[in-house]
Amino acid sequence: MSSPGTSYERSRRAIALVVGTVLVAGAGYAGYRMFDRPPPAVASDGPDPAATVAIERTDLSQARELSGDLGYGAGRSVKTRATGTITWLPKHGSTIARGDVLLRVNDKPVVLFYGGTPLFRTLGTPPAKTPPGTPPQPPPPPVSGPDVKVVKQNLAALGFLGAPGSNRLTSATAKAIMHWQESLDLAPTGVLDPASVVVLPDAIRVDSPKVALGDPAPAEVLTVTSTNKIVTLPLDADDTAGVRAGLKVKLSLPNGKATTGTVRAVSTDATPPPSDGNPSDAGKKPQLTATIALDQQTAAAGIDSGPTTVTVPGAVRKGVLVVPVAALLALREGGYAVQVVNGTTTTLVGVKTGMFADGNVEITGTGLRPGQKVVTTS
């Protein structure tokens, strides 16, 4: 039988154990609750800075950047009336100017003249050999016409004739033809065979031959282009947006140089859009083509072709207040407002919109100034 003191000690230790267990359990539960609960919400200081943007004072422009192509433009065929065998042809990329040999047929030169009227008849009269004592003959009737004018203008430009004057064929013209023939190592007959000349408006660049050496000379012998590089700009037929002849545009060339150009013409016959058979091509629209002359040919030195960015000018607003379009709020009663940030609060300010361009919009409104923050959705 245990003593009363011993029972008392046992009871005290049991109570202490129970109390300790309760305290430990309570502390554990409290710790669990402390770490299990989500952290308290932090008071917001206003709109998320990433969702605000500053009002700017700047220039707005509705200029458009479009994709064009640098090159020499469409080729055209050159025809000759010469008959015989092709014995010489110019190389691809060669430039043929007034007075240059365009090709050789039966080793005789066919020369380029500038003009708008092709030669359609033999011009000139060979010097007459009159036996001694023969009475003088009346002069032949004068020959004149636009073809004579072309010959005289070219002979004058090449230095074989003085001022071309009238469009009549004179004895001075015949002498000039003889001197020109001698310069080409031809017999100086003073008679110009139309088959020996090709008349074109200007100098040409040889793109590709249509014949080979040894071939008989057909009507078409060469494909040629302009000597000047141009930019062709495709446009949707329903969206030419002010692109017209005479318009000045900015050009960013494939060689990285910037220059300007002038729209020379815009086609009026719409063509089907380019297609490679993809289903997405079904949405493409018929196209027109704008031809743009480079204001400075030297800007395209060293490169013949490649993609070119064309900047077409548009309306401009200078020094206006601007925000992204995403900052506009449509009001229920009509019109728009912007949400101006004032410290931890925002205020709606009604605005009048002006020009829209490149995702931005011109605004005016009471109290608005550059640098103010407004809420935007992006």
Image (cartoon, rainbow, N blue to C red):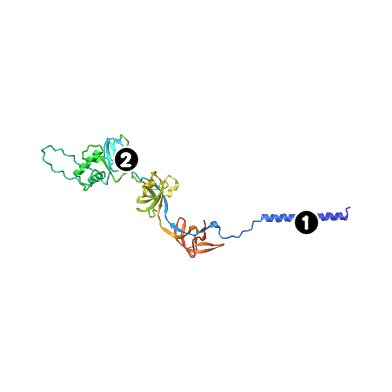
Q: Nearer the viewer, residue 121 or 135?
A: 135
- Asked whether the viewer can see residue 292, the reply is no
Name the residue carrying label 2. Answer: 222
Q: Are marks 1 and 2 in contact (CB under 8 Å)?
A: no
Classify 230 as above or below 353: above
Residue 19: give its label: 1
Q: CA distance from mark 1 to mark 2?
A: 112 Å
The x and y percentages for residue 57 are: 47, 59
Are there few (<14), some (14-19), or many (20+) residues within 10 Å of tag 2? Answer: many
Residue 97 badge: none
Q: Residue at x 71, y 55 (%)?
A: 29
In front here: 274 or 318?
318
The reply, left or right, for residue 167 in relation to residue 264 is left
Q: In the depicted view, which residue is nearer to us: 370 or 216? A: 370
Residue extending farthest top: 214
Task: Report if residue 175 is visible in the image.
Answer: yes
Q: Amino acid at mark 2?
A: Leu
The percent position of residue 301, horizontal first and vertical second, equals 38, 45
Mark 1 surroundings: few (<14), some (14-19) or many (≥20) residues within 10 A: few
Q: Mark 2: which secondary structure?
A: strand
Q: Quadrant of residue 188?
A: top left
Residue visible at 46% across and 58% down?
58
Give the residue type that dot 1 points to: Val
Measured along the vertical axis of the image, is residue 272 above or below residue 322? above
Element on which disc 1 rests: helix
Residue 170 appears at what percent x and percent y? 19, 44
In front: 325, or 190?
190
**From what the image shows, is residue 336 above or below residue 75?**
below
**Which tag, 1 or 2, sits closer to the chain's start?**
1
Q: How many marks?
A: 2
Residue 200: image location, x then y, percent = 29, 44
What's the residue at 71%, 56% (across, down)? 30
